[in-house]
Amino acid sequence: GSRAYALTGDGVMLELAVLHFAINHVASKGFTAVSPPVMVKDVALQGTGFFPYGREDTFTLEKDDLYLVGTSEVGLVSLHRETILDESQLPIRYVGISPCFRREAGAAGRDTRGMYRVYQFQKVEQVVFTHNDPEASMREHQLILNNAEEILQALGIPHRVAIACTGEMGMGQVLKHEIESWMPSRGHYSETHSCSTLWEFQARRSMIRYRDANDRVRFVHTLNNTAIASPRIL
């Protein structure tokens, strides 16, 4: 049916190979690989900023009061919820892999054909916790953006990087770049990666802090970017 698909044979092997390549590439940069939970509590989605406005796009397990994540970013950021870190631990860099689920409620009638906008997909995601410093955030932003570009370059996929205007930015985002890859079946470039800097936004909602050299407790800055998402990349 619409927004559902099944990969078979070589399609399965290709997806596994691409996901494995992407997570290996990012892990080789010192990122810690994580397979986080995909069923989370309301508080995890509130803390990362996907609730309250993203409820329509989120699949709900009502009997258990749980939700299916649309990105492993939710589980990765929540690993340090209500934690005070030591400054020496920063930056903390994760590369997560998980199935992801989105209802696409706000995309009714759009991209219903093909495998561009589907209910369930696989994604390798980068998440970073760093110092409360715009310059430190910018360095990490460039790092995770470069990682994604390197993966596309290695795969031989033409792409372009666009900076998102304010109207395209989500709640709490301070800076956002989107990578658009060339898709012959669509005849144009389409978004495959989204790189976001959020400064203190998620940290304040999730109470993720660190103690600096002056013994002050400060909120971390968080960032995230796709490494690869399938089947869109296929």
Image: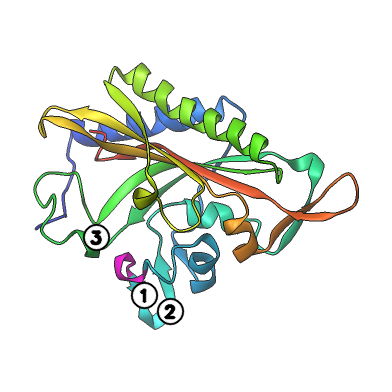
For badge 3, the amino acid type reads: Glu
Residue 75 at what x, y percent from top left? 52, 56
Report the quarter where the C terminus lies: top left
Which is closer to the viewer, label 2 or label 3? 3
Relative placement, left or right, of 17 versus 79 is left
Whole-angstrom CA distance, mark 2 to mark 1, is 6 Å
Disc 2 vs disc 3: Cβ atoms closer than 8 Å? no
Identified by mark 1, the residue type is Leu
Within-10-Å neighbours for mark 2: few <14, some 14–19, many 20+: few
Residue in front for this viewpoint, 53 or 98: 53
Nearer the N terminus, badge 2 or badge 3? Answer: 2
Relative to residue 143, is residue 35 depicted above or below? Answer: below
* Magenta region, main secondary structure: helix
Q: Nearer the viewer, residue 163 or 88?
A: 163
The structure residue drawn at horizontal position 44% and vertical position 68%, both measured from the top left corner, is 51
Which quarter of the figure is the N terminus placed in? bottom left
| Extent of the magenta region | 55-59
| Quarter residue 171 falls in | bottom left
Residue 205, quarter of picture:
bottom right
Residue drawn 68% across the image and 50% down it: 220
Task: Pinpoint residue 156: horizontal percent, then vertical percent.
Answer: 29, 17
**In the image, residue 96 lies at what x, y percent?**
49, 44
Mark 1 element type? strand
Identity of the residue drawn at 29% across and 32% down: 180
**SS for callout 2:** helix
**Label 1 – label 3 distance at C-alpha:** 17 Å
Q: Which residue is mark 2?
A: 64
Is 210 situated left or right of 54 in this image? Answer: right
Residue picked out by circle 1: 61
Measure the C-alpha gap from mark 2 to mark 3: 22 Å
What residue type is disc 2 on? Answer: Asp
Q: Which residue is mark 3?
A: 104
